[in-house]
Image: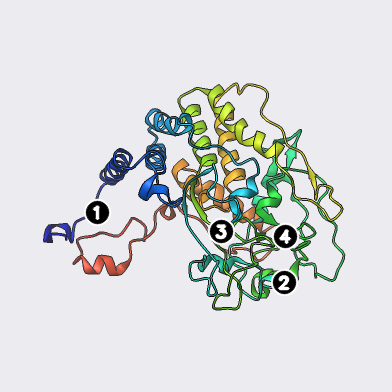
Amino acid sequence: NYGASEFNQPNATEATLWAAIEADFAFAQANLPSSRSGDYSQAGRPLSWAAQAFLGKAQLFQGKWGDALTNLEAVINSGTFALHPNLLDNFKSATENGPEAIFAIQYSADDAQSLQGNTTGALNYPGGGPFGSCCGFYQPTQDLVDAYKTENGLPQLDTFQDSHVTSDYGIESAADFTTYSGNLDPRLDFTVGRRGIDYNGYGPHIGKDWIRASFADISGPYLPKKNVYTKGDDANIGTGGWGQQLSGINYHIMRYADVLLMAAEAAVETSDLEKGRNYVNQIRTRAMNMTTVKAADGSDAANYEMNTYDSPWTDQATARKAVRFERRLELAMEGHRTFDLRRWGVAETVINRYISKEAEVITPFAKGQVFESKHNLFPIPLSAIDGSGGVIQQNTGF
């Protein structure tokens, strides 16, 4: 129950909001168990380590680098979590809730109606092919695909936008298409569905016929993969409202790779470049050693080339760029990117450049659209302002 004093309060300061968030996570950390037993045997229940990881994340978002590193390393050093040997295992029902899962929305699709399945995620399935007819949302971008190009096994931090990975944009499925022959990070094909590359066990992505018709010309030729079920995961599940099957794959809110990369960022910002490099290399080592996406003959589906950062980072700016780029590659399509760009203060520059580069391949893309500084915040709903009697003020620029 809330007293009358809780309502119609003026806009809080950013510092006040962050203090409340930190207090909530600190309370949860102090009061949740640190291991699974009794009522907390169920995998979906958060442990104290999850609360501490989110406390570290809240501090990271504020630039409290030392505090963030302390909390994130406590989670790392607890020995409770580890990287899955194969990235894909984080996104398969048979291997989810594994060593990398810190906090995930739990989904189940083992009943006739799939009532506990990921209903909204079904909107992101291919617009055709083996998944029914709906709905083709949440398409990866050309800019994201280009970011997975490698040179000597490392990301092209400064030059990845200079050329594009070959796409089948504008090419009919019945027409010939040759896939990109350059070197790529193997994580690309676990993240993005590309023509000619196996799509989650359903055979090669056939191109335009699997893209929703109304999207094919305005948002590109790619499909998401991480939270789309693999062949075999669909054996015992029912159907959703549009005839498509619903995924029982959990949605990760926090996984161990994220904690390692946040710790790497905090380490770099506190000038411990070597510690940051070590954490990034743990992520890259997993990607080097995991099973890659295969062609029908058992060979690699593309020219995968992956290495660790073997030479020390010599300056903070280079280290910062490498850590931020690694977050994009590892956590792509998991809901982090926009928030990262905003907290780093680079959203306006990066997103506007992305819009212009994307239009080089997808010519109608986002014509006339500009990301402005005001877009770093969402507008407050008019209903909330009106309901407060005008006490709440709209964010600047809206």
**Residue under numbered circle 3:** 249
**Residue under numbered circle 2:** 129
Residue 66 as seen in the image, left or right of residue 12: right
The answer for how far apart the CA atoms under marks 4 and 3 are is 16 Å
**Residue under numbered circle 4:** 199
- Mark 4 lies on a secondary structure that is loop
Q: Quadrant of the C terminus?
A: bottom left
The location of residue 353, given as percent across then percent down, is 60, 50
Asked if the residues shown at circle 4 and circle 2 are in contact, with their CB atoms under 8 angstroms apart, the answer is yes
Asked if the residues shown at circle 3 and circle 2 are in contact, with their CB atoms under 8 angstroms apart, the answer is no
Residue type at mark 3?
A: Ile
Q: Which badge, 3 or 1, comes first in the chain's sequence?
A: 1
Q: Which badge, 3 or 2, comes first in the chain's sequence?
A: 2
Q: Residues within 10 Å of mark 3 (few under 14, many from 20)?
A: many
Q: Quadrant of residue 72?
A: top left
- Mark 3 lies on a secondary structure that is loop
Q: Quadrant of residue 284?
A: top right
Residue 48 as seen in the image, left or right of residue 333: left
In the displayed structure, 383 sits above or below 36; it is below
**Residue under numbered circle 1:** 11
The answer for how far apart the CA atoms under marks 4 and 2 are is 11 Å
The answer for how far apart the CA atoms under marks 4 and 1 are is 47 Å
Q: Quadrant of the N terminus?
A: bottom left
Q: Which badge, 4 or 1, comes first in the chain's sequence?
A: 1
Residue 63 as seen in the image, left or right of residue 147: left
